[in-house]
Amino acid sequence: MKIKLLFIATLLFWGCFNGKKPETVAIDALEKNQNKQVDNVSDLEVNDFSDFEKYLKKKDGKIHVINFWATWCAPCVKELPYFEKLNAEYKDQGVEVLLVSLDFPHLYEKKLIPFIKEKKLQSKVVALDDPDMNSWIPKISADWSGSIPATVIYKNDTREFYEQSFNYEELKEKLNPFLNH
Amino acid sequence: MKKSIQVLAAALVLVLISAFTLSEGYKIGDVAEDFSLKNIDGNMVSLADYEYAKGFIVTFTCNTCPYAVQYEDRIIALNNKYEDKGYPVIAIMPNNTAVKPGDDLDAMKERAESKGFTFPYLIDAEQTVYPKFGATKTPHIFVLQKTDAGNVVKYIGAIDDNYKDESAVTTKYVEDAVDALLAGKDVPLKETKAIGCTIKV
């Protein structure tokens, strides 16, 4: 906390020095802090499948869009902005995007956390670390061969699974039936 | 006019059906078609070249997928254990190298040399073989048994149940499958799922 205050104070000083309105600078700094959801490995929620299963079974009337991805998966990284956009644009309509990283645990610190920070990901990010993949992949979908990206969209008991890449239009198309449901 | 629309519709249906059939790939019990693919040494390799073989451990893998890399040593160990028993590893790189230059023939050759691959490492340059198998990712294993009817698919899936820690593996799916086939028994677990890198088209 002290460091944060010092940071703001420094910005205030810097702001004054540059002739900007100091208030604005301070607010910007606070907002930037709020955007950072995962700053280091200790902030990252890591689940094995039994912990993770709760995210697949919510019956809260919300539309859950769960995307399985990894920083090493180029097509996953390519489509992440569409999930981010979906999260931002449909939040008010009860849509929640969850980005489930399948990165290797030993690379959380080196790859995943810097990626989350660099891309300023706004959707909730959790890691799934459960090496006995044959035991849990079929529980997510019997149709899933195990390649990523893969996405689950569900609302209460209605559920669809997609083992494919999306662009934004395609993603909206898959979301629409849930919005009207 | 009406007739031509009907013909067109029928053609479209046929195209759709064949597209779906192609994308599904082999199921357990299907006979796998032979192929002729270029090895890293420049020679063409077919399953028919292996007269001594009782079957094959066909492994779709590549240089650039971290899961595939994680399994490289175990793929080498599989070949060392089973080649002499009649089940050699045949590794096939299925990615489009325009998308993944790190998987082109030169890179494959380099990787095979540095790791000391003891098996052929073939390139599916036209990307026609992996769809027939129905491989979707790397690594993706198909154990075939040579019979009078052809090479029958006996196992599809992962190598074992722990990609990240070999010492924590509890079930070696591929070894169990090949051991069963060598003993004239039924494969205990015929299909498994694992996370892998999507084959790049």
Image (cartoon, coloured by chain):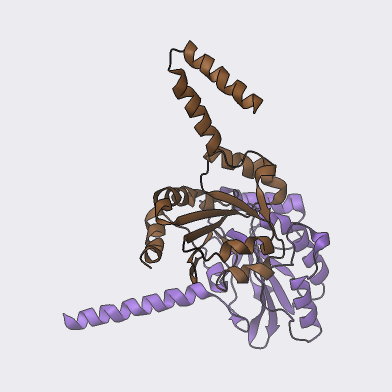
Determine which quarter of the picture holds residue A21: top left
The residue positioned 38% from the left and 75% from the top of the image is: B16
The residue positioned 41% from the left and 54% from the top of the image is: A167
Determine which quarter of the picture holds residue A52: bottom right
The residue positioned 68% from the left and 69% from the top of the image is: A134
Between residue B69 and residue B119, name the one nearer to us. Answer: B69
| Colour in which the image shows chain A | brown
Residue B18 in view, yes or no: yes
Determine which quarter of the picture holds residue B112: bottom right
In this figure, what is the number of numbered marks? 0
Supply the letter of whichever chain is purple.
B
Residue lying furthest left in this view?
B1
Q: Position of residue A41 (x, y in %)?
A: 68, 43
Which quarter of the image is occupied by the N terminus of chain A? Answer: top right
Placement of A114 over or under A161, stated as above or below: above
Between residue A66 and residue B57, name the one nearer to us. Answer: A66
Q: Position of residue A99 (x, y in %)?
A: 55, 53
Residue B123 in view, yes or no: no
Q: Is residue A137 left or right of B116 when viewed as pictured?
A: left
Q: Position of residue A5 (x, y in %)?
A: 60, 24
Q: Position of residue B13 (x, y in %)?
A: 34, 79
Between residue B83 and residue B42, name the one nearer to us. Answer: B83
Which quarter of the image is occupied by the C terminus of chain A? Answer: bottom left
Between residue A86 and residue A62, name the one nearer to us. Answer: A62
